[in-house]
Amino acid sequence: MRRTKKWHRAAVTAVLVLTAALLSGCGEQLIVMNPKGPIGESQKDLILIASALCAVVLIPVLGLTAFIVWRYRDRKGTKASYRPNWSHSTVMETVWWGIPIVIIAVLAVVTAKYTYALEPSKPIASQQKAITIQASSLDWKWLFTYPDQGIASVNVLHIPVGVPVRFELTSDGPMNSFWIPQLGGQMYTMSGMAMTLYLQADEAGVYFGSGANFSGEHFADMKFNVDATSQTDFNRWVNEVKRTSPALTEAGFEQLSKPGTTQPLVYSSFPDGLFSKIVSKYAAGHSHGQSEPGMKGMNGMDGGSGTDMKDMDMKDMDMGGMDMSSHQMNGRQAEAGTSGHASH
């Protein structure tokens, strides 16, 4: 008996130590539960509501399981009731069928409501005019172009606080996923497609951004900082970049798009219609999640520089270094492995 108690104490201690060790690695991931914007805040609420509803079932079930295992274990002198002829209980049937049905119904309604409210391309209600930033996932880095400001950056992102940001997303390589955990959920970037995602930062700070979809050898290096500052500081940063940084040329982009990693970079300008060229580089005819007037598929896609794709003469585009052949397109799609859909 004394030996059994020792084993029980050792098992309990081991479970507690293992639990503490596992939870110690959750520091970075828990930033999802510390949102800094309206989208992230709503998503955290949905996570908490869904977890609470699931806990209504899980906690009693796990508790009863432990109690039944202990109460009805095989031992001498047990006083647990033994009812071999018991076959039906209307009360119990009502409880174990009724509660899950009610919970599933409530969870379905809540999830549908939040899913509609958090549709990625739905503009954020604000008195501030949204700014547009185009994010392109490359092998293995992030290129951000600011069409309204005429600048570009790599692996670093600056946004003004309290202003909705309309991200236009695509990929010049394998499929990836754009994710700033404290501002909102991830959204896929896919070659040949342009996606829309609205986010906003309500507090100044530096937030973690990352690629959330495995895309090869240096996938883990596809991280970037999001520097959320006041509008004044953001304008000051833009002016400084325009004054002191080099321009991103066509040749520079071709070099940048080659597989490899790099430190954060900034550029005082970028080629006109660069985002549109990246999208049209691989395919035409796709549109997804585009609710803006200028984002109506490839035939009506806003190039981000005020140029509408339907008015563009493809023959006049500088396609140097861009392989439009079906072989290249198929190769890229195969490398991506699959296509997906956006979600917060």
Image (spheres, rainbow, N blue to C red):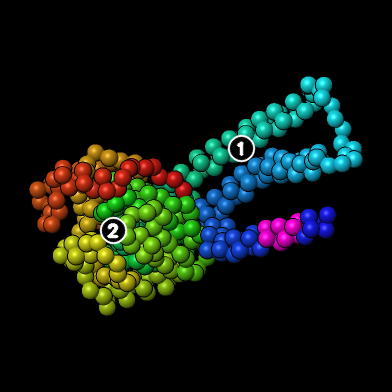
Which amino acid, by three-letter code, is at mark 1? Leu
Quick one: 152 or 254, which is closer to the camera?
254
Q: Residue furthest bottom?
A: 244
Quick one: 63 or 97, which is closer to the camera?
63
Q: Position of residue 170 (x, y in %)?
A: 30, 51
Q: Magenta stretch containing residue 14, yes or no? A: yes
Q: Position of residue 144 (x, y in %)?
A: 32, 62
**Position of residue 7 in the picture relative to residue 222 (left or right):** right
Which corner quadrant holds the N terminus?
bottom right
**Position of residue 150 in the picture relative to residue 341 (left or right):** left
Which quadrant would residue 311 be assigned to in this image?
Answer: top left
For label 2, the residue is 138
Real-space Cα separation, disc 2 to disc 1, in angstroms: 38 Å
**Position of residue 23 in the picture relative to residue 272 (left or right):** right
- The residue at the point 32 percent across, 72 percent down is 263
Numbered mark located on residue 99 in the image: none
- The residue at the point 45 percent across, 59 percent down is 180
Disc 1 packing (10 Å; few <14; some 14–19; many ≥20): some
